[in-house]
Amino acid sequence: MTLRSHKNKLLSVILLITMTLTAASCSSGTKGTTETSVSEEASTATSSVEEEKTIKEGRINVADDPNFKNKKKISVQRDGIELTGVLYLPEGDGPFPVVIFAGGMGAGHEYLADIAKEQSDNGIAAVIFSFAGDKNLNELTARKEIADLKAVIGGVRTLSCIDGSRVFLWGHSFGGLIASYVGCRFPDEIKGMMLVEPAYPMKDQISKDYPNLADVPGNMYSKQFIEDLYSFDIYEYMPSFKGNVTIFLGTTQSALGTTSPEHYERAKNTFSSCELVRIKGANHEFELKGRDELIKGTTEFVKKNI
């Protein structure tokens, strides 16, 4: 899928976000995963997630891609749900450090293939996958995406070709918010994070537009989406993460780095070690302008921190 066709596919989602905000073969383990829960009460943070101290091992299947030697098809099981994606492996036997990518709301994983492949070309394994809610945005919630990402991490770490002590998270937009949460809640298990225009401003902007959250149109966000989103404050968790963080921001009018710079300055000052990288000419999607710089920055960050 080209970047242009990806943009067309996600046009409605992107418009919604911008308006609201102005994956050599490997052996695997077989242990099951347990879905964790973000509180269903908007006023309190999740107790069940906070009680968990580690990300549990998960079930993952790996299949060769007949057309590509080092590209593997993967599937991860999470509470009867199958998450599918792609594992890119470097030449050699490993174990390799790995970057696990969390895409934007409803975006799937295809638009991240070029960034992931570049990692494998540089000796770094990469995983791209689709969240369960990508096929039906009405069922997408933070709770479910957190559970999906944890299941993928837990499954990928069981592979013999992966160095489970060197796991990096990369998240874009809403995926950036989800990656931030998982990284901050399990800081000893994540080596570093790269966040691309993470959706930190979303909650504040919704509150501004709809002071009474009960008035948020159902065709914009589901009731469960709102409850999950408001069940935690990502800034409260940021100091827990002691690894390095880089936040990539665009500079065009559609970029969150332009419309809501104060949220990223706050993140920079709240994380233990965080750098803001503004890429001139990039929009929220980093679709064309700035994409080469984003790819280069991703690779350099991992190499520097492994």
Image (cartoon, helix red, strand yellow):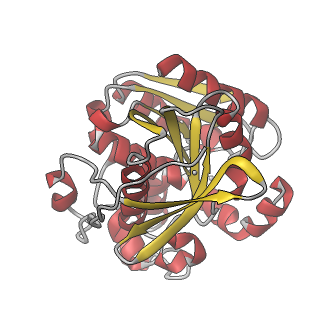
How far across and down, in percent of the image, does residue 142 sit?
Answer: 40, 63
State the residue at coordinates (40%, 21%). 273
Residue 43 in the image: above or below residue 53: below
State the residue at coordinates (31%, 26%). 242
How far across and down, in percent of the image, does residue 301 sit?
Answer: 56, 24
State the residue at coordinates (53%, 39%). 99
Count of numbered marks: 0
Residue 39 appears left or right of 261: left
How far across and down, in percent of the image, does residue 85 sit?
Answer: 59, 60
Q: Quadrant of residue 117?
A: top right
Q: Along the line of sight, which residue is nearer the eye, 38 or 25?
A: 25
Q: Along the line of sight, which residue is nearer the eye, 302 or 196?
A: 302
Q: Along the line of sight, which residue is nearer the eye, 162 or 37?
A: 162
Residue 65 in the image: above or below residue 285: below
How far across and down, in percent of the image, does residue 137 sit?
Answer: 55, 75
Residue 191 appears left or right of 73: left
The residue positioned farthest toward the top in the image shown: 304
- Can residue 253 be seen by looking at this rendering? no
Residue 223 appears left or right of 187: right
Where is the N terminus found, in terms of image quarters? bottom right
Q: Quadrant of residue 49?
A: bottom left
- Can residue 113 be seen by looking at this rendering? yes
